[in-house]
Image (cartoon, grey):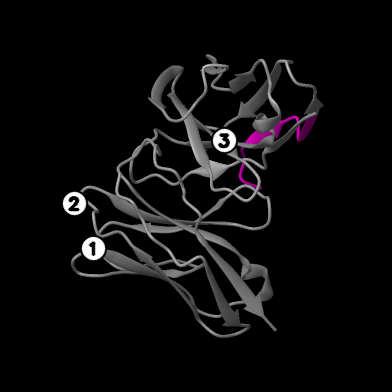
Amino acid sequence: DSGVTQTPKHLITATGQRVTLRCSPRSGDLSVYWYQQSLDQGLQFLIQYYNGEERAKGNILERFSAQQFPDLHSELNLSSLELGDSALYFCASSVRGLANEKLFFGSGTQLSVL
Amino acid sequence: DAKTTQPPSMDCAEGRAANLPCNHSTISGNEYVYWYRQIHSQGPQYIIHGLKNNETNEMASLIITEDRKSSTLILPHATLRDTAVYYCIAHTGGFKTIFGAGTRLFVKA
C-alpha cells in the first residue's frame, strides 16, 4: 500500500459527460501529480501541484483541469469526454516535488467513455 | 529532462540476475536517474534512484557509468513476481518527462 488513495477505482460514462477523479496524497506529502495511461502506452504527465499551487504542466488538454485543496487532496476534472479519454489515470505524491524525491503512486482510476 | 532509451523487452530465468540497461546520453549534471516498475495495470512502484554513485537497496542495485550516459538496473535474483514493465527516467524534478515505453521484463520459470 503506497498510502496514496484514488477514488473511484472504476468509472464508466458517456461521451460529452464530465467526471471528477479524486486523489488523497500520502500523509505529509505536499506535492501531487496526475498521469494518464492509455492502452499499451506509457505514462503521460498531465500536471503537478505543490501545496495548492500549480507547479508544472504537461500534455493536459484544455478540457481537463485540476486543483489541489487546502487539505492537500487533489481533483482532476475531465469534461466534454471523448472516446479517446478512456484510460487509466494515476495520481502520485511526494514530499516537496524535488528531484531527489521518489514518487508514490495510487492504484489508479480506470475511466471508460462509451 | 534528458531522454532515455531502453530495450522494449527482455527475458530472464527465474533465480538469475536481471540486468536492465538504460541509455541517457544527454543527461545533465543535476539530473537524477530513477527506476520504477509497473506490474500489469497497477500504479508504478519506485525501485531505486541515483545521481553519480552506484546505489543498492533491498530491491535492486543501480550501476551508473562514470560519464553518467548510461545505467543498469540489476535485480539480483529475479522471481516470477518481477515480471513487469521497468521505466528508466532522468530528471531534475517536476516529472514533466514522459515515462516512455520502458522495458517489458519477462521472468520465466
Disc number for residue B68: 1
Task: Tell me if I can see residue A30 in this picture.
Answer: no
Badge 3 crowding class, 10 Å Cα cut-off, few under 14, some 14 to 19, many 20 or more, is many
Whether tag 1 and tag 2 are in contact, CB under 8 A, the answer is yes
Badge 2 crowding class, 10 Å Cα cut-off, few under 14, some 14 to 19, many 20 or more, is few
Badge 1 crowding class, 10 Å Cα cut-off, few under 14, some 14 to 19, many 20 or more, is many
Q: Is residue A79 part of the magenta span, yes or no?
A: no
Whether tag 1 and tag 3 are in contact, CB under 8 A, the answer is no
**Residue drawn 54% across the image and 48% down it:** A42
Q: Chain of mark 2?
A: B
Q: Are marks 1 and 2 on the same chain?
A: yes
Disc number for residue A6: none
> Position of A60 compared to B50: left or right?
right
A8 vs A16: above or below: below
The amino acid beneath tag 1 is Arg
Q: Tell me where residue A69 appears, x and y as whole percent.
A: 54, 15
B109 vs A68: above or below: below
Disc number for residue A26: 3
Q: Nearer the viewer, residue A79 or A109?
A: A79
Q: Chain of mark 1?
A: B
Q: For numbered disc 1, what is the local secondary structure?
A: loop
First to last magenta residue range: A1-11
Task: Name the image quarter holding residue B98.
Answer: top left
- Dot 2 corresponds to which residue? B29
